Structures are given as C-alpha cells and as structure tokens.
Image (spheres, rainbow, N blue to C red):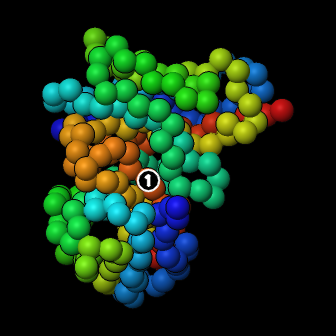
Amino acid sequence: GDSVTQMEGPVTLSEEAFLTINCTYTATGYPSLFWYVQYPGEGLQLLLKATKADDKGSNKGFEATYRKETTSFHLEKGSVQVSDSAVYFCALSTSSNTGKLIFGQGTTLQVKP
Amino acid sequence: EAGVTQFPSHSVIEKGQTVTLRCDPISGHDNLYWYRRVMGKEIKFLLHFVKESKQDESGMPNNRFLAERTGGTYSTLKVQPAELEDSGVYFCASSQVSGPYEQYFGPGTRLTVT
C-alpha cells in the first residue's frame, strides 16, 4: 500500500544552520505531496505542497521538490530559526478531492540559539 | 474565521470506560476527517465524512469506534469500551468539497487510557 518514510528524529540544530529532513514515498499513480508542521500546542498546518513531478513547493523559507525518479520530497531550509522548532510531517494524497492523507512518522526539530 | 476546534483537549479515562471526542469543522467545510497519532508513530487516517455521509471508514480500527456527523456539521468519535492501545492524539481536519482541498487541522485531543 501507499506509505511515507521520514528520517528519524529528533534533529537538533543551531540557529542559522542548514536543514534537511528526508522524505521518501511509495504510491500507486501520481500522488500530491505535502509537508505539514505542528508547533507546540497547536494543530497541524500545511507548510507547502507539490502536485506533480518536478514541482517545487515553498513557504516561509522552506522548500521541497517533488522528485518522481527518486520518489522523494525532502524538506530544506537554508537558515533555521529558533521559531522553526516543531514537528514536521511529510504526507501524500492520491486523491485531490477526497483528500485522505497518508503521513510519515514525523520529525522533531529543535533549534538552539 | 474560526478554525477547526476539538473538545476536550485532553482526556484521561480508565480501560473499559467510554469517551466521546468532538470536532467542529470550519463553517462551510463539507469534508471532515478523523486521524490518530499513537505516541511517536505516524498519523493514521481513520475516516472521512462528506456532509453527514461516511465516505471512507477504512481506517477505523475496530467496532469499538463509532463516528457520527449528524446534520453534517460537528462530528463525534466515541470509543466504547476504551482499551490501552487507544491512547494517542486524535486529530480532526476539514476541507471544502468544491476546492481548494487543503485540509485544516484542529489542535487534537490527547486521549490517555490507563
């Protein structure tokens, strides 16, 4: 079945460091790919998305490129801030209008000043 | 505009008891989803409503779980009787049927079964 695999956390970085969180997927057809973020005490928020191969999603300095050949959607940010500390979830959906999401296990990011 | 709200934020119950979780979606969102995250694991889909109809309940773990959405507005998820493995965070999300299809999530209900 469809699945998402994320790198194990937690990830601890110093402020202004470069961030990569790896995400790979297995899916039939052509899924849409998402990164969600959960800040402490809050619900999940959509961070960025890509709906077809080679699309790049970007938001708040974060980027991820839909790589069909490697079935990957790695999240990157050039310079992290303390406020980026959160749990990051990679997800896919194989149906754009019914929208059932399949998530990875989440990666906790802690950024230290 | 109010976001997705969930109640309670945290519930602690004993094994064998009953708990009812509530989700109020964003007004006008006909799609409503329930998900669950067991500690440290992935968030798993439970079921999907379109208005008051269950569109997909393939993720419901067993018949101890009952979801309803009377009138197509708020939804409840009842667990009866609760077991230890039901502990986790239950998320609700909503989206528009007509698009855009972004799912807006609530803050979750943390359920602890002792």
Place of residue B87 in the rendered image (x, y in percent of width and height, measured from the top left): 44, 68
Q: Decide which of A106, B98 is in the foreground and name it.
A: B98
- In the picture as drawn, the residue positioned furthest to the bottom comes out as B17
User: At x 83% / y 32%, what residue is drawn?
Assistant: A113
Image-quadrant location for residue A80: top right
**Looking at the image, residue B14 lies above or below residue B96:** below
Query: Is residue B35 visible in the rendered structure shown here?
Result: no
**Badge 1 amino acid:** Tyr
Q: Decide which of B110, A35 is in the foreground and name it.
A: A35
- In the picture as drawn, the residue positioned furthest to the right comes out as A113
Circle 1 crowding by C-alpha within 10 Å: few under 14, some 14–19, many from 20? many
Label 1: chain letter: B
Q: Which residue matches tag 1?
A: B104
User: At x 22% / y 37%, what residue is drawn?
Assistant: A94
Query: Is residue A22 visible in the rendered structure shown here?
Result: yes
Place of residue B62 in the rendered image (x, y in percent of width and height, measured from the top left): 21, 70
Query: Relative to residue B13, is residue B20 drawn left or right?
Result: left
Image-quadrant location for residue A13: top right
* Helix, strand or loop for disc 1: strand
**Looking at the image, residue A52 lies above or below residue A70:** below
Place of residue B95 in the rendered image (x, y in percent of width and height, measured from the top left): 34, 54
**Looking at the image, residue B103 lies above or below residue A72:** below
Query: Relative to residue A19, is residue A69 drawn left or right?
Result: left
**Looking at the image, residue B100 lies above or below residue A28:** below
Place of residue A38 in the rendered image (x, y in percent of width and height, measured from the top left): 56, 48
